[in-house]
C-alpha cells in the first residue's frame, strides 16, 4: 500500500494503474489481513504472548496500521474484528501512539490519501 499510494506522491514516481492499486488492495485485505486475523484466532491479545506485546507485534503493527491509515477503509472493524481489537491495543502503547499521530499528521499535511 505504501508503494502504490505514497510512492508516486512522495517520490515523484509515475502513478500506478487502477488495476495495480486494486491488486495491492486485494492482497492487503484478501491475503494479509485475512491471514493476520487467523493468527489472532487463538484468543490471546497479542501474537506471541497472550498478555503483552512483543517485537513481532510492533513490526506487524507498523505495517498494518500504515496500510489501514493510507486506505482509510470503512467496514474494517466488521470485516476483521480481531485485527481491529489488536490495532487498538497496540495503538494504546505510548510509543506507538506517538508514531501513529505523527504519521496521520504527515498524511493529512501532504494530502497523501
Image (spheres, rainbow, N blue to C red):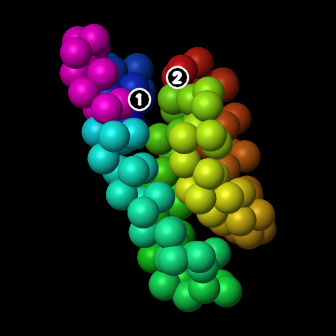
Residue 103 among magenta residues: no
Of residues 51 and 56, the one nearer the viewer is 51
**Residue 62 sits above or below residue 107 on the image:** below
Q: Are marks 2 and 1 in contact (CB under 8 Å)?
A: yes
Q: Is residue 38 above or below residue 34?
A: below
Q: Is residue 1 above or below residue 88?
A: above
**Rendered image: mark on residue 48:** none
Residue 11 seen in this snapshot = no
Residue 2 located left or right of residue 78: left
Residue 28 left/right relative to 101: left
What residue lies at 66% left-to-right and 37% top-to-bottom?
104
Disc with the residue nearer the chain's start (2 vs 1): 1
Q: Which residues are magenta?
A: 14-26
Q: Is residue 40 left or right of residue 2?
A: right
Residue bearing the label numbered 2: 112
- Disc sitting over residue 6 in the figure: 1
Magenta includes 17? yes
Q: CA distance from mark 2 to mark 1?
A: 6 Å
In which quadrant is the C terminus drawn?
Answer: top right
Amino acid at each position: 500500500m505504501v508503494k502504490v499510494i505514497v510512492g508516486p506522491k512522495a517520490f515523484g514516481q509515475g502513478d500506478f494503474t487502477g488495476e495495480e492499486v486494486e491488486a495491492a488492495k486485494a492482497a492487503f485485505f484478501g491475503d494479509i489481513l485475512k491471514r493476520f486475523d487467523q493468527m489472532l484466532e487463538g484468543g490471546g491479545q497479542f501474537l506471541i504472548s497472550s498478555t503483552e506485546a512483543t517485537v513481532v507485534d510492533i513490526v506487524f503493527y507498523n505495517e498494518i496500521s500504515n496500510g489501514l491509515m493510507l486506505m482509510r477503509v470503512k467496514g474494517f472493524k466488521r470485516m476483521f474484528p480481531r485485527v481491529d481489537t489488536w490495532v487498538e491495543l497496540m495503538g494504546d502503547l505510548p510509543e506507538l501512539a506517538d508514531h501513529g499521530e505523527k504519521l496521520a499528521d504527515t498524511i493529512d499535511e501532504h494530502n497523501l490519501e
